[in-house]
Image (cartoon, rainbow, N blue to C red):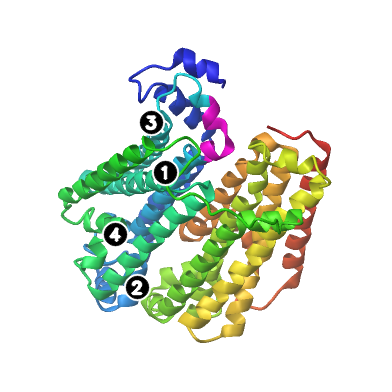
Amino acid sequence: MTATSFSVRGGGTRQLAGTGILLRFALRRDRVLIPVWVAVNTLMVLSMPNTLKSLYGTQAQRDDLMHQMATNSSLRALVGPVFDDSLGALTAWRVGVYAGALAAVTSLLVVVRHTRDEEESGRQELVSSGMVGRRAPLTAGLLAAGVASGVLALLVAGGLAGHGAAGAVAFGLGLAGVGMVFATAAAIVAQLTESARLARGLTAAVLGAAFVLRAAGDSATDDGSSVLTWLSPLGWLENLRPYAHERWWVLLLFVAAAVVQGVVAYELAGRRDIGMSFLPTRPGPASGRLGTAGALAWRLQRGGVLGWSVGFFLAGVVYGGLTDGAADLVRDNDNARQIFERMGGRSGITDSFLASMTGMLGLIAALFIVASVLRLHGEETSGRAEPLLANAVGRLRWAAGHLVVAFGGTVLIMLLTGLGFAVGYGKQIGPIMGSCLVQVPAVWVIGGVAVLLHGCLPRAATAAWGVAGAVLLIGWVGPALNVPQAVLDLSPFGHLPKLPGGSMHWPPVLILLALAAALVTAGLTGLRRRDMTT
């Protein structure tokens, strides 16, 4: 879409001229990202009622759950308190925190992509040369995030309506509220920073802080009344209490936060030039020190690697500290134990829980490697790769620098995950470390798919997010729904040994490594032979 088409068809007020066209363009660009993330979130939520019905089908089991959650502060920190034993209330309890976090991630990715990413690539300057209002790009980004949040709310409310319309609507609106709070937070950060990756990282850090505040508050009280819980938008979601005498007034907190943050973002957007920021990047040294393509790749991606590393280490500490409490909760529930055994093996409930948690973090690590590999795509489409390749730097050397960071970074964050478990749990350090590292071959396969798509089908490179989302869906929802093993085997993670506790089987690990190598080789071959995109 050219700048001319924007100038001819742009309309509306002067500040918002062209917003409608920019919104349609944004939704077109996000025709893969938004549907995949919303579908994963929706299916995660809607799969819970049947699973929970099998886990807590009797009143005695539900009474025991209520007692366990009231007395187990570790589990409340993990998933929040339970306010009612109805199936709808249990669904909101079990997936509310994580569905809200996923909605927040979707929104921050969308907003940063259509604001700071566009400015960093130079495309926004071209678009703004037409009849496009100063605040139109920001408005289009927020509206795109609103579309994603609204569709999620409609799907969740419709899917859970059979368990109670009021609770379903409250839960759907709460998820949309979390999404919009972090959409507007991302809009503010995008004005403050000069880098899209820094904007994503800082907003993700705010989300992490919200999770920590909620966890700390819920561990202190069993009714969500802690001040720390109320300081977190994720805490607002649980205190909305879907299916447990809904507190509709809590929705006003989401509205107020989104409006205030939106006003701040709009004010900041009107006070700076395109491409500039209120916190500009610190100038580099007078004499250059980036002598190789690999050094440049590390300089570009070191912030992301650091952020993911810290996040995974802290996650390991948290889940390690919760291991004994979680094992106690499911020890007497046959159905819950079977789910953990499907995810983590049959070597004992504690080992099954540890294997499940390290496997879950391995699934999330797939998002890191996709983001890191697709940095190649971003550098190419923004035009920054072309002047670099015009010098004595071959395509393979250029790509290799980013791939070393992506694939080596995976090893680093999984090592730090194991160290986190060692700090939080303090037992079985060697086996847990092995359990974390055994996830690496499967993560590398997903990274190999991203390399293949970028090298051979650059226009479809973002479909790698769809592959990662599908793997997440299979790994998170599949065991709970008792799907056939053939479906679980579609994910590379389904072929890994169940560690700790299980025996180490090398053939599937070696096959996955060989598959990853083949995918990367094919992708680099395609990159070497095709024309560069702009």
Instruction: Say which residue label 2 marks.
Output: 75
Where does the magenta region start and end? Answer: 117-126
Instruction: Say which residue label 1 marks.
Output: 191
- Distance Cα–Cα, label 1 vs label 2: 38 Å
Judge left or right: residue 120 versus residue 286. left
Quadrant location of the N terminus in the rendered image: top right
Q: In which quarter of the image is residue 436?
A: bottom right
Q: How crowded is mark 3: few (under 14 residues within 10 Å), some or many (20 or more)?
A: many
Judge left or right: residue 99 versus residue 232. right
Q: Dot 4 lies on which element?
A: loop
Q: Quick check: marks 1 and 2 in contact, CB under 8 Å?
A: no
Q: Three-letter amino acid code at disc 4?
A: Ser
Q: Quick check: marks 4 and 2 in contact, CB under 8 Å?
A: no
Q: Is residue 125 magenta?
A: yes
Label placed on residue 135:
3
**Where in the figure is residue 205, as x and y percent of width and height?**
43, 59
- Distance Cα–Cα, label 3 vs label 2: 44 Å
Q: Dot 2 lies on which element?
A: helix
Q: Which of marks 3 and 4 is in front?
A: 3
Instruction: Say which residue label 4 marks.
Output: 232
